[in-house]
Amino acid sequence: MPPSQIVPTLLDKGRYIASEASFYRVLKAAGQLNRRGRQRSRKKSSKPTSYTATGPNQVFTWDITYLPSGVRGQHYYLYLIEDIYSRKVVGYDVYNRECGEMASQLLQRTLMREQCFNQALVLHSDNGAPMKSLTFKAKMEELGITSSYSRPRVSDDNPYVESLFRTLKYIPSWPSKGFESLEQSRSWVENFVIWYNTEHKHSRLNYVTPSERHSGKDTEILRKRAKVLMAHRQAKPERWSAEIRNCEPIGEVHLNPEKEAA
């Protein structure tokens, strides 16, 4: 666990030992600052179409990614829907092919689970065949969903879900030799989603979990962290040369490529 995760985890338990910078200095002195797991360096990505999420269930983004099987040339397909405000995985399933009908069924189930029928909702995606199939477009129209698509010939115009897929494929438990069956792939993805939503302290959410952000618990969690830090600062002012770390909720989230491209 890196210092960026250690410090907020301890704060949530009412403890403060040292700043992230102090942890990094100790790790550097011990020669333990090598990159962990399978994570690669990030590439700069474009930001997507003009919408703003001020709360959960306002802007979703979705995509399909390959999951390798143990048979050369055979893949499974993970369909995944993410809420950009909370980064929570709100819908997912694994199938053995890409299909607009399967995507439509997943979308319907997701809205039922999130109880967000009959409200303004934007769904962003790339320009893949399932995303633009007549079946899927008809389902979005039936559900009253506004569609948003990546710009043509822009390969990284869906950064939220692409970042999530990067996390999924570079965690240590990723089966590099492939999945033995569709059932195994579904079980693995289910465990990943539980971890990601409820345990993973997301750096873009000021180190709260997607589920905490989605449910609105992030404000109180961050307030308590600030209280722990302030108490430590008052008790040992000699250890502080700057303000306490930012413990504010991140606020609204934007899906906005045009302004960035201008």
Image: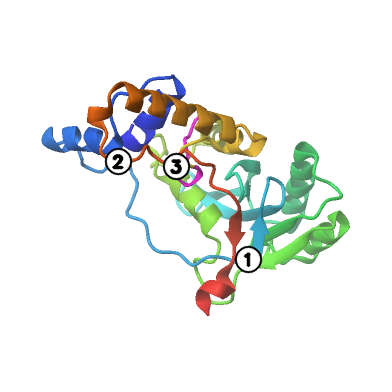
Q: Which residue is mark 1?
A: 128
Would residue 148 be found to the left or right of residue 212 on screen? right
The answer to whether any part of residue 70 appears in the image is no
Which residue: 39% across, 44% down?
Answer: 170
**Disc 3 or 2, which lies upstream in sequence?**
3
Query: Which quarter of the figure is the N terminus placed in?
Result: top left
Depth-wise, is mark 3 or mark 2 nearer the camera? 2
x and y percent of residue 220 in the render? Answer: 57, 30
Image location (x, y in percent) of residue 17: 29, 24
**Spot occupied by residue 125 in the image (x, y as percentages of width and height):** 64, 61
Q: Which residue is mark 3?
A: 178
Q: What's the residue type where badge 3 is placed?
A: Gly
> For the magenta stretch, what is the residue range?
199-205
Residue type pointed to by label 1: Gly
Three-letter amino acid code of the residue under disc 2 = Ala
Position of 249 with respect to 83 (left or right) is left
In the image, residue 124 lies in the stretch drawn in magenta: no
Mark toward the viewer: 1 or 2 = 2
Q: Nearer the viewer, residue 180 or 111?
A: 111
Find out whether the residues at labels 1 and 2 contact each other: C-beta distance under 8 Å.
no
Residue at the image point whose x is 55% and y is 61% from the top: 158
The one of 31 and 77 positioned closer to us in this rendering: 31
Q: Which residue is mark 2?
A: 242
The residue at the point 32 percent across, 54 percent down is: 41
* Chain-order first, disc 3 or disc 1: 1
Confirm or deny contact between disc 3 and disc 1 (CB under 8 A). Answer: no
**Of 112 and 242, which appears nearest the observer?**
242
Distance between the Cα atoms at labels 1 and 2?
49 Å
